[in-house]
Image: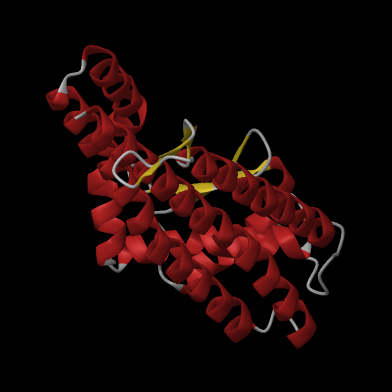
Amino acid sequence: MGYYSLGRGMMYGFDWTYLLLIAAFILSMIVQVSMQNTFSKYSRIGTRSGMTGAQVAQMILESEGLFNVTVQPVAGSLTDHYDPRTKTVNLSQTVYGANSLAAQSVAAHECGHAIQDARDYAPLRWRTALVPAANFGSRFSWILFLIGLFMASGVLIKIGILLFSIALLFQLVTLPVEFNASSRALAKLEASGWMQADELAGSKKVLGAAAMTYVAAACTSLMYLLRMLSLGGRRR
C-alpha cells in the first residue's frame, strides 16, 4: 500500500516541493531566453530618428526639466539602471552609444525611473526604503533557515522565512515601479514623434520582455518561499 501525508507532503519519500524548484528554474530560463532574444533582435534594428540611447535619454530629461540628472555609460550589457542617490541614468555599452530600437527603448525606460523620482512616485520610495532590508534578507535568509533546520531551531527557521519574505516584498513592490517606468517611457517616445507606429510596437515588445523578467523573479521567489514554509512546517 502507498503512503501519503498532507502534513508532510510526502509520497514514498518524494518531496513535492522539488517540483517548485523545477518550475522556478524552467520559468526563469524561458523568460531570460525570451528577453535576450527580444533585445538582440531589436538591437539590430535601427530607428528612423538615428538618435543614440544617450541622446534620447538626455532629451527626455530636458523635456521634463530634470537638468540635475546626468546620463553616463556603464560597463556590461543589460546593466542599465537609474540611481536615485546620485541622480544618474546609467546606460550600458549596448545602449549608450547605439541608435537601435532596443537602445532607445531601454534609455527611455531608465528615464521613466528618473521621472518617478522627481515626481515622488510612492512605490519607488517604498522600494528604495526596502533596499537595505531586502539585500540583507536575500543574503542571509537561507543561511539562517538551513541552520535552523539542522539545529531544529524553530526561531531560526522563522527568522529565515521572515527575511526571505522581506526580499520577496521588495520584488513585489518592484513590479509597479517597472511597469510604470515603461508606461512613462512609451508615452514620452510617442509624444516626441521620434518613433513611428511600427517602431513603438517594437519598443513595447522590448519593454514587455524586460518587465517579464521581474514578474518571473517574483514568481520564482514565491515558489522558494512556499518550499521554505513547507520544509519549516515539517521540521516543527
103, above or below 139, in the image:
below
Closer-to-camera residue (95/151): 151
The residue under the point 47% across, 30% down is 13
Q: How many marks?
A: 0
Q: Quadrant of the C terminus?
A: top left
Left or right of 40, for residue 207: left
- Seen at 24% across and 30% down, the residue is 160
User: Residue 64, relative to residue 145: is it above or below?
Assistant: below
Q: Is residue 146 above or below residue 43?
A: above
Where is residue 198? Give x, y as percent.
Answer: 79, 83
Residue lying at the far front of the rendered structure: 1
Residue at image position (38%, 56%) is: 174
Looking at this view, is 107 or 158 the one in front? 158
In the depicted structure, whether residue 119 falls above or below residue 150: below
Between residues 18 and 73, which one lies in front from this camera angle? 18
Residue 57 visible to an observer of this rendering: no
- Relative to 49, 122 lies left or right: left
- The residue most toward the top is 151
- Colour basis: secondary structure
| Quadrant in which residue 235 is drawn | top left
At which x and y percent is residue 64? 43, 72
* Residue 171 appears anywhere in the view: yes
Residue 94 location in percent, x, y? 73, 46
x and y percentages locating residue 231 in the rendered image: 33, 33
Residue at 51%, 47% (x, y): give it: 81
User: Residue 148 occupies which quadrant of the picture?
Assistant: top left
Please give left or right for residue 159 compared with residue 184 in the image.
Answer: left
